[in-house]
Each structure stands twice: as C-alpha cells, then as structure tokens.
C-alpha cells in the first residue's frame, strides 16, 4: 500500500475536483495546485500551495511552463524502493509526490468548433499535463495517476478503508487509464494536424489515422466457435448507434448477434413511420412500415417466415405488449427497440433466452465506416444518402402513381441495407421478396421472386428496387414476369436505353435515382 501524503492537482475539467480535494484533505494530504484549479480550491476553503511557490520558480511563457520543473517531476518519478533515488530527493530537498490528478486541455472540443484556427488548436495542446500523467503512471508502484473524474470517489473510498493509502491494484488500473488517456490525446492531435494541407485546409481523411476503442465485452467466440472475439466500443459512440445499447434481459450477445443487430437497427431507425425490420445473416429478410408496430411486424414477418426463424427484430417505436406477445411466439435471437411498455417486458420475460436491447434513437451516424482488409483498413463516410419523390427521374412512358412512388421510396430505403447485388420487391409499405448477395443481378431478381413464392405472396402490382443499375434487360424481364409494375434503380449503364425499352415493352414505370447503394 502507498500512503498518500502529498498530491498535485491541475485539471481543465473541474467536475468533482473540489469534493475530491476535500476528501484528500480529510486524510491530511498536502495539496499543490496551479492557476485556476488552485483558485477554485482556495475559494472552497481548502489550503493549497501554488506550484510557483512550491518550486520557487514563477510560471512563465503565458503559463506554458508551470509544472515542468525538477522539483515536480523528481518528486513524481523517484522510486521509493531505490535508496539512490530517495537520497537524491533528500539532497535536493524535494518531497515525494504521491498522487497526481490531471486532465488535459480540451483539444478535441476546440478543433471541433467551426472556424477553429491552427493557432487556436496549437494553444490547446497540453504539454505539462501529459508529462505529469506519464511520469506518475510510469512510477505507478509508488504514485497514483488520476486522469478520470470517475475515479475520484473509488479512490477516496479505498483510502477510507486503508487509512489514507492506495493499493497496488488501483494504482496499476489508474496507470492503465492514464497512458490510454494520453495516447488518445496525442492521437487526436495527430489526426488533426495530419489532415491539414499547406494552406491550412482540413481534409476528411488524415495522413495518419489514430483510433481508440474500449473493450466492452469478451465474446464466447467469433463468427464460428474456433475463432476468438470481443466487442470494442468507441470512446464516444455515435448517439443512437448500437454502441449505446443496454441489454435488459437474455443470454450474452454473440459476435453474430451484434453484427446482425447493428444491421437491423440502422435500417429500422431510418424510417419515420412505425417500422419493423427483421434481419438474418446481415440482410433484411423482412421490413415494413404501418400505422402500428403490430401491423408492421405482421407484414415484415410475412415476407419470409422461414428466414425470420432465429432472426433479429428491430422496432423504431416503444414496443407494446401485443406486438411483444406475437413475436415471442417465434424463435427470436434479439429484439431491439427504443423502449418497452410494461406489458411488453412481461411478455418477453416469459422467454428468458431472448436478448432484449434498448437503444435511444438520435440523429446522426458513425463519422466513418471501417472495414479491415489484409494489412490495412478501408475507411469511408457512411451511406446516409436519402431521396425524395421530387428527386427521381422518370425515364419510361408509364409513370408511377402516388402509391407506387411511396413504395418505390420505401423499397429504395430497404435496398440500402441489403448486401449487393440487391433486389427488393415491395408493396403496401412492406417487403415481398428480397434477393441478396448474388454475383449477378438477374439471379438476385430470381431469388427474390422465389422467396415471395415460398412465402405465398403475390408480386402482381409490386415495385422493385435495385441497389445498382441493371446491366442488361434480363433483370427487367424477370421482375416484369414476376408481376412488378414499377422499378427504382440508379441508372448509368451503357445499356440504359435497352433497359428502358424493356420496361416500356412490359408497360413498367421506371425511376432513376442517380445514386448507388452497394453494400459489401
């Protein structure tokens, strides 16, 4: 155990710092501090020694040099179990510093502000703070390095139980957090600076990309039982993303559960109307919008009941008891919703193995999409493109009516979340057949029609979305023969005229979007 006798406190984020300092003072800890932190503590009635008075050297260079002094760093870095170190401190009349509580200038917040200049960014790069944290963390067998206000209360509780000491386990855990904190800080600086060109313009992608994630959960295995796996969460997950989920009941989430849950949630939250999306193996096998969740679920499930077995079901509204009762009658791996009515919770509790997640919707998305490849990382902005009816280009003699337009836009939204090549038949605000992940588009069209037939659904009068252009007329022939009356697709093929002519031949309306939705 290391008894805390003297502490240095210098924080930008002053959350909880007065209470923490009071707690330290109750154990007789001498407090040393800087600038605004010292004033705050003194105004709170605490006895504080300014760093300048402690070192005998005034702050200089507009505060850039405060704690960068041998009397500070020697007191932090000296090994208490090394006689030579302690003799050196004694000869120089330097007391040991047993605790360093530091958090850093808000660099990330500064550069996130619109119009932040390079000069402002540079001024928000902390030098003394990271040096202090790293020194304390390096010497963690003897010094507590406190970088996170969330650790104030647990540290004081341990001191209360040990007569003012901090144990080795906590000091090591604090050191881990301190090094991670400074690594994240330096990574943010690198991301910002390497994104700037000679003119000071900031690019989307920095030349050196630094990423930070926290281990959220060790998983039983990966996609297959012979693979090891874990779930890492961003330090600040995008609001409304799966990374913000809470699990209310059920078994531990698996690697595949998480991957499929993300696909289902991202799809369902893109709709404004009450919606249900059912995902199996990363693809929507059923999706619908309706006046109620119960009706949306019924229509989504009807698309492909066989594939829905063991699927992930997501809703974009509070789940009611009746809908929960209906879905609990099938085999479900995961249910996701923003909230659950009391009756829904009761119905789902009868199926203890169902994993029940709550995610609070919020605007926005992940800043970047990441995909690992051998020896590298593919990085792109997320596919958030959305279309209104007025942005469609109708290229055929037949024109879609209002109901068809609504279904075309619905189908186009669903197709965004289906693996390429993607073909989606829809009607009445619901999917009727989904063809996904085929090497040829015409085969996706055939599979989607087969799926509808297996589910006993008619495609007469349906609409079709294709995530990319039809390269030949054969895909048009297949969906027309299946009963489709309107198509939405990007256009842009060398054979667009041939494809348009085929649609006219079949009396089908066709809309071009001018945008593609490949998903691999």
Image (cartoon, rainbow, N blue to C red):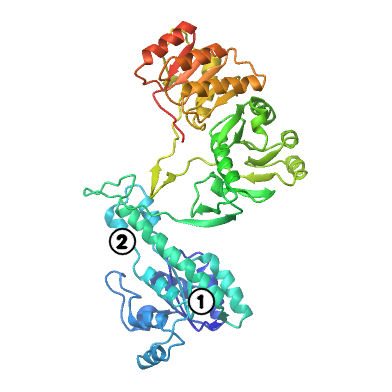
- Residue at 65% across, 33% down: 308
Measured from the top left, where is residue 375 in percent x and y? Answer: 38, 50
Say which of marks 1 and 2 sits in front.
2
Measured from the top left, where is residue 458 in percent x and y? Answer: 63, 15
Above-or-below relation of 1 to 460: below
The front one of 200 and 116 is 200
Q: Which residue has dot 2 on it?
A: 123
Q: Earlier in the sequence, mark 1 or mark 2?
A: 1
Q: Are marks 1 and 2 in contact (CB under 8 Å)?
A: no
- Could you tell me which secondary element the residue under label 1 belongs to? loop
Q: CA distance from mark 1 to mark 2?
A: 31 Å
State which quadrant residue 472 falls in.
Answer: top left
- Could you tell me which secondary element the residue under label 2 belongs to? helix
- Residue at 53% across, 57% down: 215
The front one of 123 and 147 is 147
Q: Which residue has dot 1 on it?
A: 45
| Mark 1 closeness class: few <14, some 14–19, many ≥20 residues within 10 Å | few
Above-or-below relation of 180 to 459: below
The front one of 325 and 498 is 498
Measured from the top left, where is residue 362 in percent x and y? Answer: 53, 42
On the question of residue 145 being in view, the answer is yes
Give the residue at the far left of this rendering: 198
Q: Is residue 229 left or right of residue 491?
A: right
């Amino acid at each position: 155990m290391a008894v805390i006798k003297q502490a240095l406190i210098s924080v930008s984020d002053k959350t909880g710092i007065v209470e923490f300092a009071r707690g330290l003072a109750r154990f007789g800890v001498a407090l040393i501090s800087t600038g605004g932190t010292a004033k705050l503590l003194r105004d709170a009635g605490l006895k504080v020694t300014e760093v300048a008075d402690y070192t005998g050297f005034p702050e200089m260079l507009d505060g850039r040099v405060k704690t960068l002094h041998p009397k500070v760093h020697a007191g932090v870095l000296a090994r208490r179990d090394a006689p030579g170190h302690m003799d050196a401190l004694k000869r120089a009349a330097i007391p040991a510093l047993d605790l360093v509580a530091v958090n850093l200038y808000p660099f990330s917040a500064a550069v996130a502000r619109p119009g932040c200049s390079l000069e402002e960014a540079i001024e928000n790069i902390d030098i003394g703070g990271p040096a202090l944290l790293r020194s304390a963390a390096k010497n963690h067998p003897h010094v507590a390095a406190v970088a996170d206000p969330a650790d104030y209360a647990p540290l004081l509780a341990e001191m209360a139980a040990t007569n003012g000491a901090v144990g080795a386990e906590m000091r090591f855990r604090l050191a881990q957090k301190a090094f991670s904190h400074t690594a994240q800080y330096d990574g943010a600086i690198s991301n910002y600076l390497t994104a700037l060109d000679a003119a000071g313009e900031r690019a989307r992608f920095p030349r050196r990309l630094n990423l930070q994630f926290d281990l959220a959960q060790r998983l039983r295995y990966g996609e297959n039982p012979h693979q090891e796996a874990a779930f890492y969460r961003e330090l600040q997950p995008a609001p409304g993303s799966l990374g913000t989920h809470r699990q209310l009941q059920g078994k531990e989430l698996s690697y595949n559960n998480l991957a499929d849950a993300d696909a289902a949630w991202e799809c369902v939250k893109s709709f404004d109307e009450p919606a249900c999306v059912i995902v199996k193996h990363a693809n929507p096998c059923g999706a619908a919008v309706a006046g109620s969740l119960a009706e949306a679920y019924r229509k989504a499930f009807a698309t492909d009941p066989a594939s829905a077995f063991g699927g992930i079901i997501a809703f974009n509204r509070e789940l009611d008891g009746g809908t929960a009762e209906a879905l609990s009658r099938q085999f479900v791996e995961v249910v996701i919703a923003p909230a659950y009515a009391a009756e829904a919770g009761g119905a789902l509790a009868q199926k203890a193995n169902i994993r029940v997640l709550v995610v609070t919707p919020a605007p926005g998305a992940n800043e970047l999409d990441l995909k690992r490849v051998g020896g590298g990382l593919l990085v792109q902005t997320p596919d958030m493109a959305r279309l209104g009816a007025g942005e469609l280009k109708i290229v055929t003699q037949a024109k879609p009516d209002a109901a068809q337009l609504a279904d075309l836009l619905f189908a186009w939204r669903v197709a965004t979340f289906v693996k390429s090549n993607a073909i989606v038949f829809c009607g009445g605000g619901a999917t009727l057949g989904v063809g996904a992940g085929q090497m040829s588009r015409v085969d996706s069209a055939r599979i989607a029609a087969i799926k509808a037939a297996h589910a006993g659904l008619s495609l007469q009068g349906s609409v079709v979305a294709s995530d990319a252009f039809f390269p030949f007329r054969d895909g048009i022939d297949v969906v027309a023969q299946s009963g489709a009356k309107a198509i939405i697709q990007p256009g842009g093929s060398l054979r667009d005229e041939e494809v348009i002519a085929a649609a006219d031949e079949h009396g089908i309306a066709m809309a071009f979007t001018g945008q593609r939705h490949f998903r691999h």
